[in-house]
Amino acid sequence: MPKSKKQSSSSDSDSGPDDRAPPAKKSKEQNAKEDKKDAVNNQWTLEKLRQIRISEFRGRKLIDIREFYEKNGELLPGKKGISLSITQWKRLLEVADEVNRAIEG
């Protein structure tokens, strides 16, 4: 008996739909309050649904820079992102000035 091929569709992706309406604008005061709250929860918003979060996996802390999506009113992590070890994160911070100079130059 021949094996059936599993067909994938764009709905299989967990990165969420690309045609979302943009979120409502927030005031500077609302953003400042959310930034304080986020720092307490070890998560920071970079832009819209892109966030930095500190997580733990197998006893190791990781810095997770990831795109999230909303499903049933819940914010879930998507496939697009990277998790850095503490060592990798510190190295990224060390070279950040060099990267900025390369961007500007």
Image: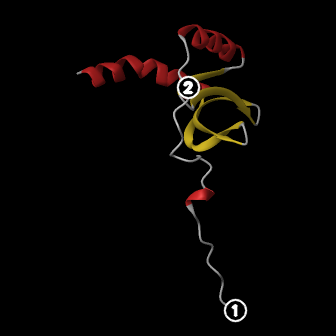
User: Residue visible at 49% across and 23% down?
Assistant: 91
Residue assigned mark 2 = 24
Q: Nearer the viewer, residue 52 or 14?
A: 14
Q: Is residue 59 above or below residue 72?
A: above
Which color scheme is applied? Answer: secondary structure
**Which residue is denoted by mark 1 in the rendering?**
1
Hey, which residue is sitting farthest left in the picture? 105
Residue located at (61% from left, 77% from top)? 5
Tally of marks: 2
Residue 98 left/right relative to 44: left
Q: Quarter of the image holding residue 23?
A: top right
Q: Does residue 36 sit above or below 99 in this rendering?
A: above
The residue type indicated by label 1 comes to Met
Measured as percent of width and height from the top left, residue 32 is found at 59, 9
Going by the image, does 46 lie left or right of 72? left
The quadrant in which residue 43 appears is top right
Amino acid type at image mark 2: Ala
Quick check: 88 above or below 27?
below
* Label 1 SS: loop
Q: x and y percent of residue 67 in the render?
A: 57, 37
In-image side of 91 versus 59 (left or right): left
Per the image, label 2 sits on a secondary structure element best described as loop
- Which quadrant holds residue 20? top right
Indicate the position of residue 45 as horizontal and vertical percent values. 57, 23
Q: Which quarter of the image is occupied by the C terminus?
A: top left
Whether residue 62 sits left or right of residue 26 in the image: it is: right
The location of residue 83, given as percent across then percent down, is 59, 35
Q: Upstream in the sequence, badge 2 or badge 1?
A: 1
